[in-house]
Image (cartoon, rainbow, N blue to C red):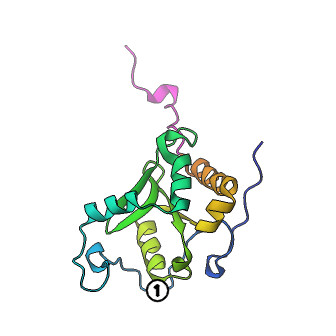
Amino acid sequence: GLRPPLPNPSPTRGEGLARIDNACPVSCSPRPLRERGRGRGAPPMDQRQFTKALRQNMTDAEQLLWKHLRAHRMDGQKFRRQQPIGPYIVDFVHFGLRLIVEADGGQHVQSEHDAARDHWLRSQGFTVLRFWNNDILQSPDAVLESIWNAVHTNTLSPPAPLPQGARGATP
């Protein structure tokens, strides 16, 4: 059977496996890709080039997650990787459920940019799940269970059939 759900960790303290970021303590305006350079003096990369580079240079944690999310491997659900959404590129997204999964390294600890980014993504109707890279690599089953729980929490049920009298007149 399924294990009980994991406790909600504190994102501000960087605890636990899944971090669903629900607060934006800073001014929440997205920073366009063209402003995120590749170093001083380097010309900005367009979004398609940048997305392609991210797909070709995935971290070990992203590769491990992708192995389990790709090709409908998680309960038949379709995830996409390194996907542009507005001015951002997210690690993994399930568009039908509006669920984003992010794999974070140490550079993401209490990141104001991440808070603004997550606020913008939530304002577009997405749920954002964040996992530390070391949790993905050391406890992949727990991470996948958290994602599975989020998928099944967000799964849209099919519309209920109309009551008999509301289906239209029969001749």
Name the spot of residue 65 as percent of width and height, x first. Answer: 55, 54
* Magenta stretch: includes residue 164: yes
Q: Secondary structure at mark 1?
A: loop
Q: What is the residue that sits farthest to the left in this orientation?
A: 43
Q: Is residue 68 above or below residue 118?
A: above
Q: Is residue 149 left or right of residue 60?
A: right
Q: Given the image, on which type of amino acid does mark 1 rest? A: Val
x and y percentages locating residue 70 in the rendered image: 49, 45
Left or right of 159 in this view: 32: left
| Residue drawn at point x = 30 percent, y = 79 percent | 37
- Eyeballing the image, is 101 above or below 160? below
Asked if residue 75 shows in the view, the reply is yes
Q: Which residues are magenta?
A: 156-171
The residue drawn where x is 27% and y is 65% is 47
Looking at the image, can residue 85 be seen?
A: no
The residue lying at 24 percent from left, 85 percent from top is 41
Quarter of the figure with the C terminus: top left
Q: Residue at x 69, y 59 (%)?
A: 139
* Residue 152 place in picture, x, y as percent: 60, 47
Q: Between residue 37 and residue 119, name the one nearer to us.
A: 37
Residue 63 within the segment the image draws in magenta: no
Residue tagged 1: 26
Question: Magenta-highlighted stretch: main secondary structure?
Answer: loop
Q: How many marks?
A: 1
Say whether residue 117 is left or right of residue 158: left
The one nearer the camera, 19 or 49, is 49
Residue count near mark 1 (Cα–Cα under 10 Å), binned few <14, some 14–19, many ≥20: few
Q: Looking at the picture, how far across and down is residue 150, in whole percent?
A: 60, 54
The quarter of the picture where the N terminus appears is top right
